Image: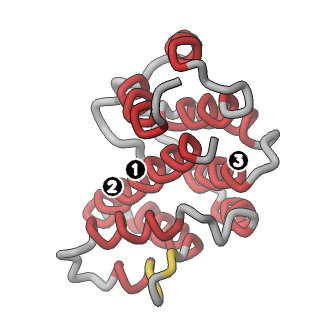
Amino acid sequence: MPHAAQQWIQFKEAIATPDLPMLGPQRRGGTKSEPEINRTLNSFFSAQNTPESRRPLLRSAALLWHDHLEASHTISQAIATRDGSWLHGIMHRREPDYGNAKYWFRRVAPHEAFPTLVERGQALLLEDGTGLSKRLIENGQWKPFAFIDECESAEQKNDAALATILRKIQAAEFDVLIQNIFQSA
């Protein structure tokens, strides 16, 4: 079986889209249909000899990345792990059902991958002059509830600039979670 880092990179390539997912439920062009995703994943799982225990997490993640929120939800709600709760929380955040997203993130935090997310978030917010970094990261700790609040604010205010940076952070969040799934074999 290939090394976890190689698998993570190959998984990202297998599910890549031209654009980052939206903060809300909006569908983007360039995403795959559910049958296409399932074919891609079945081929990936077979080629990578992916353990059965990881497949639901990765399938839920791929569906979520391709804007199939309900299909992702059906899978993630049956995964009783912090990783499953994290995917479930992202899905509800995008739905948008912010209160329910917070419920699921209570089941996630603290997560062993949050320090990596802090690093990625700080790198993305290096030039941020809005104070977003201070709202999302406090004393070196990731604040998932503050991220949910910021996503809600961006959507309600139709703040394109804020939504753009939050979409990049959401993509980093997704990457960190997927990388953690591969590393925690």
Front one among 103 and 78: 78
Q: Residue, x 82% and y 39% (percent of image)?
A: 78
**First in sequence: mark 3 vs mark 1:** 3
Crowd tier of the residue under label 1, counting other residues whose Cα lies within 10 Å: few below 14, some 14–19, many 20 or above = some
Label 1 – label 2 distance at C-alpha:
5 Å
- Per the image, the residue denoted by label 3 is 84
Q: Residue, x 41% and y 23% (percent of image)?
A: 14
Which mark is drawn over residue 159?
none
Residue 84 vertical placement versus 31 (above, below): below
Front one among 3 and 35: 3
User: Furthest-bottom residue in view?
Assistant: 139
- Residue 66, image x, y percentages: 48, 31
Residue 64 in sight in this render: yes
Residue 19 is left or right of residue 24, and the answer is left
Residue 70 in sight in this render: no
Crowd tier of the residue under label 3, counting other residues whose Cα lies within 10 Å: few below 14, some 14–19, many 20 or above = many
Type of the residue with mark 2? Lys
Q: Quadrant of residue 42?
A: top right
Label 3 – label 1 distance at C-alpha:
17 Å
Q: Are marks 1 and 2 in contact (CB under 8 Å)?
A: yes
Q: Secondary structure at mark 2?
A: helix
- Residue 85, image x, y percentages: 71, 53
Front one among 156 and 92: 92
Type of the residue with mark 3? Gly
The colour scheme used here is secondary structure
- Per the image, the residue denoted by label 1 is 171
Q: Quadrant of residue 38?
A: top right
Type of the residue with mark 1? Ala
- Per the image, the residue denoted by label 2 is 168
Front one among 15 and 89: 15
